[in-house]
Each structure stands twice: as structure tokens, then as C-alpha cells.
Image (cartoon, grey):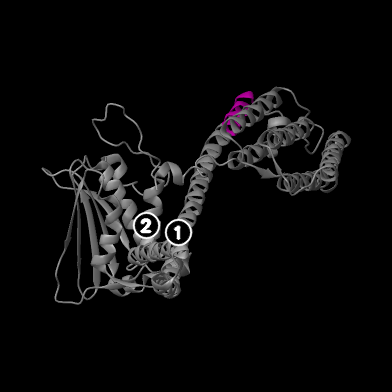
Amino acid sequence: MSDDLISADFRHPRRHVRLDTILRLRWLAALGQLSAIFIVAQGLEFDFAVLPCLAIIFASAVVNLGLQIAFNPMQRMEPIYAALLLALNIAELAGLLYFTGGLQNPFAFLFLGPVLIAATALPTRMTIALGVFAAGCAALLGYNHQPLPWAGDEAVQLPEIYLVGVWLSILLAIGVTSVYTFQVTEEARKLADALSATELVLEREQHLTQIDGLAAAAAHELGTPLSTIFLISRELEKTAPPEMAGDLKTLREQAQRCREILAKISHLNAAGAPFDMMPLSTLIEEAVAPHRDFGVTIKIRVAVSGVAEPVVMRNPAILYGIGNILENAVDFARDTVEVNAWWNAETVQIMISDDGPGIKPDLLKRIGEPYLSRRRHADDASNERSGLGLGVFIARTLLERTGAKVSFRNKLFPDHGAVVQLTWPRNRFENSEISAVAEV
């Protein structure tokens, strides 16, 4: 399965945030603002415009109640509506700061809150727009605001250079923390999407394996009644009157055809029943078989050891993982792909190598990450990308779940090409079916 097919439903996830999430944050902000006003006005007994501040908080509460009544709080909002609510949060905060000292108020750094929420849940362009809006509100508050609440009759006057520094610090904090939050959230989102695709692939492979087993069981069960039909029709054909002989011949021929079809199904599934035990060499042959007719020679070398060959229960995770790595090797190889396997009492190892251009040094340490773009050949005139690297990520994840250690490297000069090494503890490899399913 190619990267494009695997990632079709995961490449561009739409971002939606629930209305309930934003409403909870708005109620929390309103409660915090009321607490701050009460402490400053009653506890510290500072003189400032209390009524306008309470009016702003009351208006915010009315908006919250209206949204809760008019809409289902559990519904997911379109990004534009979530951005408008966050912009309203910024405007409400700017109104409160206007009556309480502007940038001189230490709570001015709360401008970061809505922008950080946007960085985790909204598209980049909307996060940038909210950041610009917050920075603009902060700039206006630097020069247009009511006095900062303070003890005594003298108002606090901070130097202009200090207010510029506060504005710049807010601006830098919004920019740096938003970029950092966006990158962390985006990586987590990509990883979650890639893991979802991994589970989907493994479920598909297991489903196909179960279908193979059902086909083999059906072929076995239907074989006996078809043989009986074939024999009876043949005997009846010998003694039947001429007008029935043609129909009986057709019946016998169709029964024989069914027997041949079921025999083919049984043959195809002879080594593929869902609970068959298969030696390592058979597992490699089954993984290699679908990739032999693409103009690239695949050489298999299985080292003979004094220790008995490992035997494993047929495992869709291992077969898919090895098959995907082989598919990439065949895609990038010029002429030959080599599959080498060896084992001892403690370890099982499979090494897959090709004679292609190898892995670029800047990608070598990142290979196996989801959505990592690669190019087919260094001299490819079309310069087309060969997928998003999701297939390699899925293969690596599935193989590591079975206990494998997966490593990527390039061949040493003067040879060229990529090498993928898979190493299992032998006891884990021979019991990998149980562990792979358990971890899903």
C-alpha cells in the first residue's frame, strides 16, 4: 500500500474546537477577573473605575449564557467562529486593562492566553491574525488608558521606555510561545494521525488474514459434498436416457470446475492460514513474493546455523512491515535488492539493502518519522516527491511492537544504497503474534 493511499484520510486533518471548551475558558476568565476586581477594590482599597469593569464582565457572561442556550456546547465549531470568540476575549481584556492602567497593569500578559489557545486548535493564518490583534490592542493601551489603581492620591507614572519594553516583551512572548506551541501541537497531531493509520493498516491486514483462513476452511468443507455430487452425476450419466445425458454431463463438468477452484484456493492458503506456524525462511519468501515482478532482482540469503531455524506464528504486523520496507527498497533500487537473514539462540536478524542512491544524510536521523518527504532518485529530473514517509513510519511502528529494533543506514563507500536492519530477541520473535495483538 503506497504512502498516498495510506495518508489520504490523515494528511490534512481539519481543526475543530468544541464550543464547550471555549465557554469554560471564558467562564474561568470572568471568574478570575471578578476576583481580581474584588481584591483590588475591597482588599487593597484602590480607587479605580469599578462599574465599567463590572459592565464588561457582565456583558461577557451574557454572551456566554446566550451561546450556551442557542447552541449545543458539545458541537465542534468552525475555526472562524472559534477565532471570533477568542478575538472577543482579547477585546474584553483590552477593555478591562484600559480602565486599570493599560500596559502598566501586570495582567497585560494575559494577552498571551487566547493566542496560545489559537496556536493549539486553529489554522496558522487565524493564529497570526489573533496575534496581530492582541499586539495592536497592547500598543493602543500603551498610550491610551486610565491611571493604574494605586494607594494614595498620586498616580503611578512609568517611563515611556519601560512601557515600550513591556509592549515588546508581550509581542515577543506572543510570537515565541505561539510558534513553540504550534510546533509541539502539530507534531503531536501528526503522530496521532499516523498512529491511527497504523492501527487501520494492522486491522486491515488481520482482516485479510482472517478472510484467507475462512476461504481455506470453506474450500475444505465444500470439497466433500462436491466430490459426492461429481461421482453421483458421473454414474447417473452412464445409465440415464439420452434426453438427460446432456444435463448430467453439464452438472458433472460444473461440479468438477468447482472442485478445481476450491483446490486453487486451498493451494493459495496452504501456507497462509491465520494460525499457521512458519519458519523464518518461509516468512521472508511470503513477504518477498509480491515484489518480484517489478524489474528488480531480489536475492534472498538465509544463513545456515547450528541452531534450529526460528518458527513464528503467521503475523500480519511482521509481514506488512517487512513488505513495506521491501517495497521502498524495490522502488529506490537500480538493479538489485538483497534480503539477508541469520539467527542464533538469542537473536533473529533480517537485513534488507538496495543499490539505489541511499538515504540523504539530512534525512537519515529522521527516517521513520510520519509525513517525512523523500525523493526517488538524486538525479531524478522530475524532482517528484515519493510520498510522505507514512508507510515507513507504519512499518517501523508495527515491527517495533513485535519487539524488533529497526535501524537505517547507508552502505559504506564505494558501495551505495540504503540498509535497513531488523533485530529481534529470539524469544520475542517466536511469540510476536501475541505481543503485537496485545499492544494494539
Which residue is denoted by mark 2 in the rendering?
Answer: 320
Q: Position of residue 32 (x, y in %)?
A: 76, 47
Q: Position of residue 356 (x, y in %)?
A: 21, 41
Which residue is denoted by mark 1 in the rendering?
Answer: 202
When asked about the image quadrant of residue 220, the answer is bottom left
Front residue of 306 and 284: 284
Amino acid at the residue labelled 2 = Tyr
Which of the numbered marks, if any, corresponds to residue 224? none
Q: Residue at horizontal 37%, vertical 57%?
A: 320
Q: Give the residue at the far front of this rendering.
A: 242
Tell me: 19 left or right of 69: left
Query: How many callouts does the rendering have?
Result: 2
Q: Position of residue 79 (x, y in %)?
A: 66, 36
Front residue of 242 and 273: 242
Front residue of 377 and 246: 246
Q: Secondary structure at mark 1?
A: helix
Magenta: main secondary structure equals helix
- Magenta residues? 159-171
Q: Position of residue 392 (x, y in %)?
A: 36, 49
Q: Is residue 140 visible?
A: yes
Q: Is residue 170 magenta?
A: yes
Q: Is residue 46 visible?
A: no
Amino acid at the residue labelled 1 = Leu
Badge 1 crowding class, 10 Å Cα cut-off, few under 14, some 14 to 19, many 20 or more, is many
When asked about the image quadrant of residue 228, the answer is bottom left
Q: Residue at horizontal 14%, vertical 76%?
A: 306
Depicted 259 relative to depicted 101: above or below? below
Decide: marks 2, 1 in contact (CB < 8 A)?
yes
Give me the C-alpha separation between circle 2 and circle 1: 8 Å
Q: Secondary structure at mark 2?
A: helix
